[in-house]
Image (cartoon, rainbow, N blue to C red):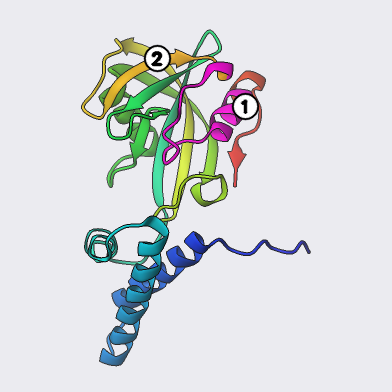
Amino acid sequence: MSKELPLSPIVLVQQLQALSQTGLTYARDVHDIKRYESLREIATNLMTQLLEMEPHVVLGRVYCAQQGYATPKIDARAVIVCDNKVLLVKEADDGGWSLPGGWVDVGDSPCGAIRREVWEETGLEVVTNRLIGVWDRNQHGHPPYPWHVYKLFFHCTETGGSLQPGEETADMAYFSLDNLPPLSLTRVVPEEIFTSMRIINENGEPWCD
């Protein structure tokens, strides 16, 4: 049996927050509630240091806003290829480039979510060919983030529409793998793009963490 690698600080804090959130969901004893609230406060203080955010922002906008049994969030990304180049969008908030996509909303199917995100961000209509990757955001060099996120990558094909920026995108273009622009690393890292393109070109097995 292989020895597991030690967990990173960000993963440990995510786990603390998840324990406090789930505990507060089910706890009924007043003393247990106070213990889980203390656990949430510890997670807040640690996350504040890791992300250099104000404590009231972490607690109010991030942790207290989450209720119910804690589970990973789902992010969906589209890999759209033309002449062996991949379509990237320039994010309006940080100026970095990313694969089109975003959060899967409640009520969305995974494929429906990525079609909606592509339409909103690029003006293109697409079909989803297949799922080519399920990535654990914590394992691939993304900047620290308050939540644990699973990232779904879909190979998509354009079927209509025309390229035009959306409310969250400032620009878009097709790029070759040897000429990628500065990426929005909170959303996508080079390994995910390179691996996705290899899987598409070789008709390989999907990536799965």
Magenta residues (range): 178-199
Residue under the image location 56 percent in, 49 percent down: 139
In front of the other: 151 or 204: 151
Going by the numbered disc 1, the residue's amino acid type is Ile
**Callout 1 secondary element:** helix
Where residue 197 appears, as percent x and y from the top left, is 58, 23
Residue under the image location 44 percent in, 50 percent down: 149
* 131 is higher (above) or lower (below) than 8: above
Q: Nearer the viewer, mark 1 or mark 2?
A: 2
Residue 152 in magenta stretch: no
Where residue 196 appears, as percent x and y from the top left, is 57, 28
* 52 is higher (above) or lower (below) than 131: below
Residue under the image location 54 percent in, 17 percent down: 179
Residue 134 visible in image: yes
Circle on res. 173: 2
**How many numbered dots are placed on residues in this image?**
2
- 40 vs 190, left or right, is left
Residue 193 in magenta stretch: yes
**Callout 2 secondary element:** strand
Q: CA distance from mark 1 to mark 2?
A: 21 Å
Going by the numbered disc 2, the residue's amino acid type is Ala
| Crowd tier of the residue under label 2, counting other residues whose Cα lies within 10 Å: few below 14, some 14–19, many 20 or above | few
* Residue beneath disc 1: 199
